[in-house]
Amino acid sequence: MNILEQLRDRFSDPISKLTASPDECLAMIRPSRDARHGDYQANFAMPLAKQQKKLPRDLATEIIAQVDLADLCEEPEVAGPGFINLRLRDDLLINITTELLTDDRLGVERTETPRTVVVDYSAPNVAKPMHVGHLRSTVIGNAIYRLLKFQGHQVISDNHIGDWGTQFGMIIYGYKNFRNDDVYQQNAVAELARLYRLVNQVSGYHAAKSKMPNLEQQLAELESRLAEHRQREEVTPEDKSLKKARKQLNKERETLNEEFASTRASIDAVESSPQLKELAEAHPDIVENARKETAKLHAGDEENNRLWNEFLPACIVALNEVYARLGIEFDKALGESFYNPMLADVVADLQEKELAKESNGAICVFVADNPAPFIIRKADGAFTYATTDLATVKYRIEELNANEILYVVDSRQTEHFRLLFTTAGNWGFDAQFRHVSFGSVLGNDGKPMKTRAGDNIGLESLIDEAIARSRVIVDENDDAKKNGPELDEEERSQVAEAVGIGGIKFADLHHNRESDYKFSWDKMLAQNGDTATYIQYAYARINGIFRKGNEDRDSIRNAGHQLLLSHSSERALALQLVRFPEVVAEAVEDYRPNLLTSFLLEAANTYSAFYNESPVLTAENDDLRYSRLLLCDLTARVLSTGLSLLGIETCERM
């Protein structure tokens, strides 16, 4: 039972009579932050009172008189300037909690209107190791996938792998010119990744060399403008607009200096290495030649296609090894190459329907109010990501029968998806499209997380580091136990893996997905605070209670013991647990897993207070003992299920 949904439904009719936007007011019915103000609180009387030209308290009293809450709540209370405080009936809370005790779904009802939803997430490029930049899409996307499936939707996870793009031209060029055969035979993926980085670095060097004269000129001109500006300020210091303009010029200089420093670093990195300098001088046209290798691949060149088919299997295996460690599987993994045969027809169909037209040799879709066109075929005949994404939309709707398609991709791609969704809609596809955007993972310097060498940190290295750090904590905790260590070597390894990987995922999911966040090992693995470890430990501690009391959770759950909520800590815990269906619904509503992480942390905190205030195994009598064991079992199931929906494992002992 979703209590919040029930309360909002009861208030819906009277509020709909007062405003054309009732949903905004109904959203103001929320769980109370302070138990002194009831279990739920409604704050809509204040904004509605302004519209109705009434006092908020008077309006709140009028609305309450029109709502029948007798079966749900005690008598509502109007407090302060017009808050409505709602406290659930104790018998109702006991009944709902009792139902959850043996409900495998913990009160989350399957949706009556299931949708077919494709969740597009992760999407790495092959032949390059996955790095920390792939973490957010992978973790957020998988959590959304799990939440939607739990609600009863038909969900298809699709890893849209980059296996046909420009990076393959660079890799093929590197393979033909720079490969180390011995290393390639021993570890093909590592050698291909090295070749990609090498070609990318040499290409970047030539681009930087071409760019540098223009940057130097821009900086010189900007310095000249600043000098002139300072002279004008000396003549007319009272003109405040000059000071504002100077600040803007200084900001432009700072940005230009950063670009200059980055460009200079790309040049120095090559010129400081005799080997790289020699390669760069020997391959002055590397950028164009790598593009030609891509074009040959796409045109069906026999040699390049043979190499592509040779490279791809090992690359896919390497990706899947990382996913296996993260406990993630995909229903589909259709790379860009899958859609290649469809691209010409996509362009032709859009032209036939007069949605695309030629512009300077390219075929483009022009979207109103967007200055840049949506290019679906370049002037040289090459297709683009836009073409592939349109083919993907067509396939997902026509072949997978998708009603909704979610793209879990970073916020930098916002314009691309806006153009994609508009074009797809005009093309005749009326599914719901959603760009589930997210921010970046930052290092301590506030910039996207990278190694000291400036490369993105490998995701596999991140996993290794998390598990290694977790193992130290697990060993220290187990060795420090009063009655001696409890875990054998295998269990310690399992716990370290669950804690390490769970810590990485939770640290990411606990933040608002649209915000950047700073990565911190200490915060991520702390046993206290906003971490998965804290919740995992609460789950393990509950199992410890049952072991210590020589009680079986399944037996107690099905024995028919009566639930008693005689202490305030028991009631608070039950109230938190019955909110699980609300939180699942809200987390899916706007695809925000952080709402579930916050709920689980609060559940663990509430359980801790219950544990300290309400003895379980040493309760005053058997009825109270078994009632509290029932609450412990339900808490463990909520914590375990909630973490599972986030892709995080629990351990019976820690």
Image: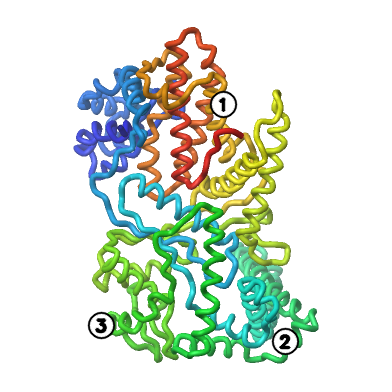
Q: In terms of secondary structure, where does tag 3 sit?
A: loop
Q: Is residue 548 above or below residue 105?
A: above
Residue 615 placement (x, y as % from top left): 53, 15
In which quadrant of the rendered image does the C terminus lie? top right
What amino acid does circle 3 point to? Glu
In which quadrant of the rendered image does the N terminus lie? top left
**Residue 527 position by quadrant:** top right
User: Which residue in the structure is indicated by mark 3?
Assistant: 354
> Residues under labels 3 and 2: Cα distance?
48 Å
Residue 605 placement (x, y as % from top left): 53, 29
Q: Earlier in the sequence, mark 3 or mark 1?
A: 3
Q: Residues within 10 Å of mark 2 (few under 14, many from 20)?
A: some
- The residue closer to the viewer here, 406 or 295, is 295
Residue at 56% across, 65% down? 318
Residue at 40% across, 45% down? 587
Q: Is residue 400 left or right of residue 140?
A: left
> Residues under labels 3 and 1: Cα distance?
68 Å
Q: Would residue 223 be visible to someone looking at this image?
A: no
Residue 160 placement (x, y as % from top left): 44, 67
Q: Nearer the viewer, mark 3 or mark 2?
A: 2
**Labels 3 and 1 touching (C-beta < 8 A):** no
Question: Disc number at residue 544?
Answer: 1
> Residues under labels 1 and 2: Cα distance?
63 Å
What amino acid does circle 1 point to? Gly
Residue at 43% across, 68% down? 415
What amino acid does circle 2 point to? Leu
Q: Is residue 34 above or below residue 318?
A: above
